Image (cartoon, rainbow, N blue to C red):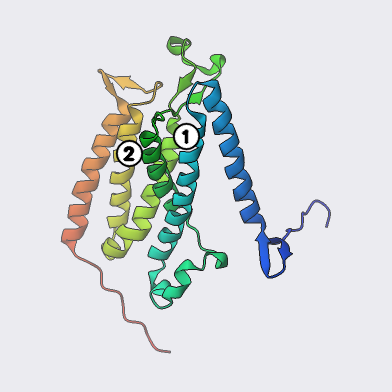
Amino acid sequence: MQGVFASPGAIAFELGPLQIRWYGILMATAILVGFWLAHRRALQEGLPADQLVRAAQWAVVAGLVGARLYEVAFNWDYYGRFPWKIIAVWEGGLAMHGGLIVGPLVGALLARRCGVPVLAWKLYISPPHRPPEFRQFDFFHPTFLYESLWNLLVFAVLVGWVRPRLGRYPGAVFFAYIGLYSAGRFFIEALRLDSFWVLGFRVAQVAGLVGVIVAVVGLAWVTRRGAVRPSPSRSS
């Protein structure tokens, strides 16, 4: 059929018993390109480039460890029965959320120890797309990225912690999501430059506070109503 691409498969090539997978090639390429860009940018801005890359290297290692631990933690029903499989990373099983949590934390700690500014984090916006009152500034906070990462963390908390503990209360997961998202949006909104204002208050922050209150009241209400017992299965 014309216009349909065939999948190249998971394995790029083999070296004896070693299988080189496309996912690993793409990940390694992205890491190397990231190191190169970070080093180049650090030299342009007068930052200690070598120390920055060294911190980034350890952050990648920590991120891989965190990704594996995250995978193991949320699949403990399997790894608890087969603990020797925990180190079998060649069989797959790296959770991106764990890497996003552990990697940046370790990288930030090492960067601070090496004298690299931890908050050298900024997004370039071209002049035509800047708010008129901030045209003299080149860099801004990537708030959409912050919100995306926060949403990933909220998802992990809902699936891995809230649902196993409160899932038997109808509506609990929903109210937990409302509260977590609203809390994150409240703080992220403080960094935005295009907020809507009413009577000196950011509308989104007011909505965030209301969302947290609704979540607390809602969780108290659904838990007070009691849990729903699963209906017994019928035998055929």
Nearest the eye: 128 or 71: 71
- State the SS at label 2: helix
The residue under label 1 is 51
Q: Residues within 10 Å of mark 1 (few under 14, many from 20)?
A: some
In the displayed structure image, the side of residue 49 where residue 211 appears, left or right: left
Where's the N terminus, which quadrant? bottom right
Amino acid of disc 1: Gln
What percent of the width, then of the height, locates residue 171? 29, 56
Q: Which residue is mark 2?
A: 184
| Left or right: residue 153 compared with residue 211 | right
**In the figure, is residue 136 to the left or right of 180?**
right
Instruction: Give above or below for 24 relative to 40.
Output: below
Question: Which of the two labelled residues, at mark 2 and mark 1, occupies the earlier sequence position?
Answer: 1
> Which residue type carries mark 2?
Gly
Mark 2: few, some, or many residues within 10 Å (few <14, many ≥20)?
Answer: some
Marks 2,1: beta carbons within 8 A: no
Question: Closer to the observer: label 2 or label 1?
Answer: 1
Does residue 152 sit above or below 123 in this rendering?
below
Question: Which residue occupies the foreground of this view, 3 or 96?
Answer: 96
> Which numbered disc covers residue 73?
none
User: On the rendered structure, is 159 left or right of 132?
Assistant: left
Residue 210 % position (x, y) = 24, 37
Q: Residue at x 30, y 63 (%)?
A: 167
Identified at 23% across, 44% down, the residue is 214
Between 164 and 39, the residue placed more toward the observer is 39
Q: Nearer the viewer, residue 170 or 121?
A: 121
Q: Quadrant of residue 8?
A: bottom right
